Image (cartoon, rainbow, N blue to C red):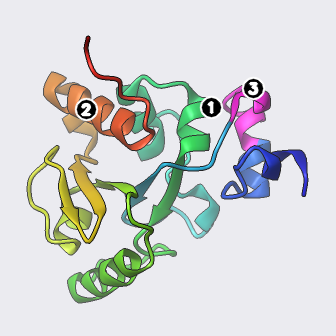
Amino acid sequence: MNGWDQKGVSHLTEKEKKWSASYLHANPDLIQGPPTGVLMGEMPPTLDPDWRLFPWPSNSIGGRILKAARIPVEVFLGKLQRINLFSAHCDWDDDQAVERASYFHNFQPEGMRVVLCGKRVGLAFGFNKYFSVLTVDGISYTTIPDEHREYTKALARVGTRTALLWATNTLRPIK
């Protein structure tokens, strides 16, 4: 077991560990796991599946979500397992998406918090409303927008921030 694994971040690939320091200037000592939530996108933008919602470059979906959430990059990397419904870039297929969503749901531990990115991913899980939380079989889901223009709207930024604070278990009640 290496130092990364001892911190509960074995979900990060070797590339992500390297990229977190070189591209994001993240402090590896501050990246702590294990993940308390899942951030699920549609599919990687390239043929490389390691780019799954990675928050670089800043105009990528992961970068836009991180910016809207305004959480430390170390929390984003350590507390969120970032995955895509499809592991490779492909044409979207509604039936396959629903099948993959069902498969994913069946393998999540009770208490997991899942943030679904975008309308199509939300619909694959049966959710059609942004920022509402629905719990099914002990697994809680919410959906956030994934379109660039949505992040210019204040409500979308606040909702995305709240969803990620909730998923990373860093949302604290107001006293």
- Residue type at the position of mark 3: Asn
Instruction: Name the quadrant of the C terminus.
Output: top left
Q: Is residue 36 above or below residue 85?
A: above
Q: Which mark is residue 74?
A: 1
Which quadrant would residue 123 be assigned to in this image?
A: bottom left
Please give the name of the residue rendered at 41% of the width and 45% of the height, measured from the top-left corner: 61
Q: Where is residue 88 in the image (x, y as percent from the top left)?
A: 51, 75
Q: Nearest the camera: 167 or 27?
A: 167
- Residue type at the position of mark 2: Tyr
Residue 56 appears in view = no
Residue occupying the far right of the picture? 2
Q: Is residue 119 above or below residue 93?
A: above
Residue bounds of the magenta highlight: 19-31
- Residue type at the position of mark 1: Glu
Under circle 3, the secondary element is loop
Q: Do the residues labelled 3 and 1 touch (CB within 8 Å)?
A: yes
Separation of residues labelled 3 and 2 (CA atoms): 27 Å
Q: Residues within 10 Å of mark 2 (few under 14, many from 20)?
A: some
Please give the name of the residue rendered at 62% of the width and 31% of the height, measured from the top-left corner: 74
Looking at the image, tell me whether mark 2 or mark 1 is earlier in sequence order: 1
Q: Are marks 2 and 1 in contact (CB under 8 Å)?
A: no
Q: Where is residue 12 in the image (x, y as percent from the top left)?
A: 69, 54
Separation of residues labelled 2 and 1 (CA atoms): 22 Å
Q: In this view, does 3 lie to the left or right of 129?
A: right
Q: Position of residue 10 (x, y in %)?
A: 73, 57
Q: Position of residue 1 (x, y in %)?
A: 90, 58
Q: Residues within 10 Å of mark 3 (few under 14, many from 20)?
A: few
Please give the name of the residue rendered at 28% of the width and 57% of the height, measured from the top-left corner: 140
Q: Name the residue under label 2.
A: 151
Under circle 1, the secondary element is helix
